[in-house]
Image: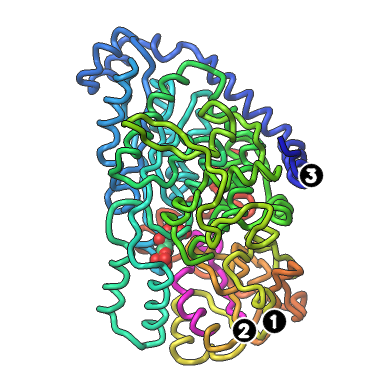
Amino acid sequence: MTKLNNTIRRVTERIVENSRASRASYLELMQREADRKPEHKDVACSNLAHAFAGALEDQDAMKAGRGPNIGIVTAYNDMLSAHQPYGRYPDRMKIFAREVGATAQVAGGTPAMCDGVTQGEDGMELSLFSRDVIAMSTGIALSHQMYDGIACLGICDKIVPGLLMGALRFGHLPAVFVPSGPMPSGISNKQKQETRQKFAAGEIGRDALLESELGSYHSPGTCTFYGTANSNQMMMEMMGLHIPGSAFIQPGTKLRQSLDRAAIHRLAELAGTTERTLAKVVDEKAIVNAVIGLLATGGSTNHAIHIPAMARAAGIIVDWTDLAELSSVVPLLARVYPNGAGDVNHFHAAGGMAYVTHTLLDEGLAHADILTVWEGGMDAYTAEPVLENDALSWTPVKESRDDTMLRPASDPFIADGGMKLVTGNLGRACFKSSAVSPDRFTVEAPCRVFENQADVVTAFKAGELDQDVVVVVRFQGPRANGMPELHSLTPSLAVLQDRGYSVALVTDGRMSGASGKVPAAIHCTPEALGGGPLSLIQTGDIVKVCASTGELSTTADLSSRTPAPDPQPQWGVGREMYRMLQMQADGAEQGASAMLASAGL
Ligand SMILES: O=C(O)[C@H](O)[C@@H](O)[C@H](O)[C@H](O)COP(=O)(O)O
């Protein structure tokens, strides 16, 4: 076995050291939960009867205590194309459970919102904190304490992190994540983006634009670009929480169904055992593997927030310095849109996660020795699932089948990973370098300050931004307005860039996993609200963003400035209900979670 890279070893050791007390107290709580009496089969008969009453044909088995009971936590709705297939999952999973003498119940549902539907709209301000709500909903589902294992059904952006955060508080049980796969490829994401730019530049009308969008988003399944949802699936593989290779198998296929069946059969096998509980599977090494996968594949920037939050729910402390140090040694192996031309279906066809895992392990760039839900540690994840005469088996993937999309770690696209930390007198921020051309890594220009995205688009349309410019969009942090994604700015900023200007975005808000191309220092922390550095900046100040030197600074003397006043919280589309969570949240680098902060985790 190849020796583990020294930086990866050192960062992992540092995370273990920094997490020593919090991890110990988490594991101790999980032990207490495992030892909790009475066990679920021994609670009062009235409680049991309540639990069994809706179980129909499984009632007898439950009454007789014949086998493990699996709790399904589902984020089904059919507003999210990725979650639409889950509508039928619970019924099928109950059948799969019976095949192996187990039972399954829908423990509960969680909300799930689509960032594609709310992009650029006020509803987006609920998005990040829906993750806390999902974690808490998972907690409600599992608080019935009637389960021996957890099956999590969720795919999209906030849902997987929320489900994991919630399930980790019940980490004395085994848990498996069951994805449902990407939709087939439609028009290419590049073509979609070009059509958007034409629309932004006034060259085509709304009809042509809608036609193009429908050519891209056309049927049930996950969106095909490598955004947050697909990065989630990558991470679940890298942490060993999937049945190996199940991330990108399309819905409605026999292979998909076989993997879903395997997930329930495996859970039934693990139920009641203590060897591979969720708390044990999600350890420091698994978290480091998730970061490595993110960097190696150029995944969504949203995970710079979600990974610290998920880790914290397991008592593990990880920050952007850890991410940046890992990024310095983890090469970029994949070019999937927005970092390349192909989509996740092409990525999977080129060897996908099995090849990524294989080549990373081969070069000592990931932890092989982690506990996974499947036997065999990470090695099991270097093979792809296939069906032979209806039987599920796995074939090792040792070569990339398309080196324009997927390259070996020994000969990568870029020697370092796709994410940089930029710091300076404007704070700490993330810069996704994998999608930006290296000649745009440094932007130094007068800034133009905005306090909402609509004003940026208005200024763009009025031609006011036709110059070298750093667009600052502030008061977009977790406590200000829930830290929305500002992805709808991408077409306008990309048009400016294509006109030959040097353009960058600096914000305490987020961008989407689908964003790229335009240099952006995002998640800037501390946020502007409450007097953070961005509240001191003024239009015309020279701002420098540099991914090569890791700089985010201004030459302006901020010490002499008075902060811009905090904006009033907005009402409407339910935003007022989320103030409670926003106000309790901590910073983006800590995971921006009210739930974790309030619990003292
Ligand atoms: O983080 C993400 O992955 C995105 O938020 C994603 O959930 C959303 O669907 C995009 O906003 C749509 O992206 P397009 O611009 O490619 O349509």
Snapshot colouring: rainbow
Local secondary structure at mark 1: strand
- From the image, tell me which residue sits under label 1: 444
Foreground label between 3 and 2: 3
558 w.r.t. 430: above or below: below
Q: Which residues are magenta?
A: 469-496
- From the image, tell me which residue sits under label 3: 6
Residue 283 in view, yes or no: yes
Local secondary structure at mark 3: helix
- From the image, tell me which residue sits under label 2: 502
Residues at badges 1 and 3 in contact (C-beta under 8 Å)?
Answer: no
In the image, is the residue at mark 1 within 8 Å of ligand 1 by its beta carbon? no
512 w.r.t. 148: above or below: below
> Number of numbered discs present?
3
Which amino acid type is shown beneath numbered disc 1?
Answer: Glu
Quadrant in the rendering for residue 387: top left
Specify whether residue 296 is painted magenta: no
| Residue at x 32% of width, y 31% of height | 389
| Residue at x 62% of width, y 42% of height | 289
Q: Indicate which disc, 2 or 1, sits on the residue closer to the N terminus.
A: 1
Q: CA distance from mark 3 to mark 2?
A: 37 Å
Which quadrant does the C terminus fall into?
top right
Q: Residue furthest left?
A: 56
Quadrant in the rendering for residue 281: top right
List x then y, in percent, for residue 220: 29, 52
Q: CA distance from mark 2 to mark 1?
A: 8 Å
Specify whether residue 495 is painted magenta: yes
Indicate which quadrant contains ligand 1: bottom left
